[in-house]
């Protein structure tokens, strides 16, 4: 195992920076609790640029294929389509129900063009969260229930393997996936973190899993057999999201929950790595006549 150190890429300090992705439109990320979708400037040391802002938490987005400027988003209590003009079309709000206060968290599109997004309770109630699968027609279906704080998922390039973190339990599970149907197999424990919590993840071109480990100031690269290959050390306590842009590793961090945040908590970090990544897939949307949604 080798260790590397990263430096802050720009002046921004986010409350809860996550959902960072490399897309055809560049690097995008969210400040979850502020409901902001952001993108990096041409020069990484410049301030982030806001693409849009929602009045609800924004967990993660993926671009919609063939519709420039349109995103599918894990937001508020469900999943929606949104664009830069602020028009929002809700596909479903499965966590909008009485009782426990819920919100959406991390999400990503898989190589087959489906979108996957997790939910969690604001108070981290055990087993309250669900991982939802959004099919091409916009149907939102519970795929995995009984999660506390879902992060990821992250997919291998062929779409046949999915990694999902349950951060509150300190575990990353691995599932087989049928690319044709979106069906998933039984979980197996890929890794367990004894100190800190596994958070945002991505898979590189060699099939290794990069994982932000909240509370430790590290991002770790795990080989497909689960062995730890490499650690990156950050001057920020709460790494939350990761993405690979060719040979660059981008890491978001958070200030939320810290009594005395340090000067780099909440910063975006960037450093070179040896193994590249690939752009995040787009959501392939082919709506049926029965999916109407609402505009707000």
Image: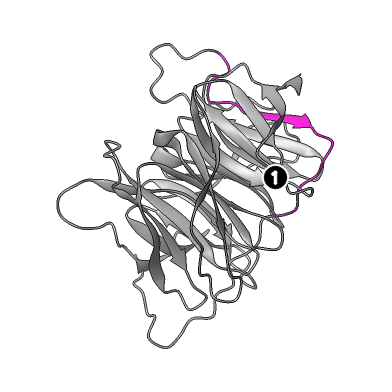
Q: Secondary structure at mark 1?
A: loop
Is residue 217 or residue 291 the one in the foreground? Answer: 217
How many other residues sit within 10 Å of disc 1, few (<14), some (14-19) or many (≥20)? few
- Classify 191 as above or below 106: above
Say whether residue 123 is left or right of residue 243. left
Q: Is residue 271 magenta?
A: yes
When asked about the image quadrant of residue 140, the answer is: bottom left
Name the quarter where the C terminus is drawn.
bottom left
Q: Is residue 267 magenta?
A: yes
Residue 55 seen by the camera:
no
Instruction: Report the residue that reaches farthest toward the bottom.
Output: 289
Residue 59 image offset from top left, x and y in percent: 45, 47
Residues in magenta, as a range: 263-279
- Classify 70 as above or below 106: below
Residue 242 image offset from top left, x and y in percent: 62, 39
- Classify 206 as above or below 263: below
How many dots with numbers? Answer: 1
Q: What residue sits 42% from the left and 88% below the top?
A: 289
Name the quarter where the N terminus is drawn.
top right
- Classify 117 as above or below 227: below
Say whether residue 30 is left or right of residue 118. right
Disc 1: which residue: 224
Instruction: Report the residue that reaches farthest toward the right.
Output: 274
When asked about the image quadrant of residue 224, the answer is: top right
Residue 169 image offset from top left, x and y in percent: 41, 35
Residue 104 seen by the camera:
yes
Q: What residue sits 37% from the left and 86% below the top?
A: 290
Task: Label the magenta part by its dominant secondary structure.
Answer: loop
Residue 79 image offset from top left, x and y in percent: 40, 61
Say whether residue 16 is left or right of residue 236. left
């Amino acid at each position: 195992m080798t260790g590397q150190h990263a430096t802050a890429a720009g002046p921004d300090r986010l409350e809860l920076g996550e959902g960072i992705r490399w897309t055809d439109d560049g690097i995008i990320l969210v400040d979850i609790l502020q409901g902001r979708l952001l993108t990096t400037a041409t020069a990484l040391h410049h301030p982030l640029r806001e693409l849009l802002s929602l009045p609800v938490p924004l967990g993660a987005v993926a671009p919609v294929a063939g519709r420039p400027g349109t995103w599918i988003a894990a937001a508020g209590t469900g999943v929606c389509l949104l664009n830069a003009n602020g028009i929002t079309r809700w596909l479903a709000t499965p966590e909008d129900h009485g009782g426990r206060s819920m919100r959406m968290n991390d999400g990503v599109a898989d190589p087959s063009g489906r979108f996957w997004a997790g939910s969690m309770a604001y108070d981290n109630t055990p087993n309250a969260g669900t991982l939802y699968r959004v099919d091409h027609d916009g149907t939102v279906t519970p795929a995995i229930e009984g999660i506390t704080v879902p992060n990821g998922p992250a997919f291998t390039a062929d779409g046949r393997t999915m990694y999902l973190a349950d951060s509150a339990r300190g575990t990353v599970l691995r599932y087989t996936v049928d690319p044709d149907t979106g069906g998933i197999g039984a979980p197996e424990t890929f890794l367990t973190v004894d100190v800190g919590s596994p958070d945002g993840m991505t898979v590189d071109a060699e099939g290794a899993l990069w994982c932000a480990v909240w509370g430790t100031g590290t991002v770790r690269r795990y080989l497909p057999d689960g062995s730890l290959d490499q650690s990156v050390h950050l001057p920020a306590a709460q790494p939350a999201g990761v993405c690979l842009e060719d040979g660059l590793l981008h890491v978001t961090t958070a200030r939320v929950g810290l009594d005395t945040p340090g000067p780099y908590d909440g910063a975006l970090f960037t450093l070179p790595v040896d193994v590249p990544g690939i752009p995040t897939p787009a959501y392939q949307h082919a709506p049926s006549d029965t999916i109407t949604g609402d505009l707000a």
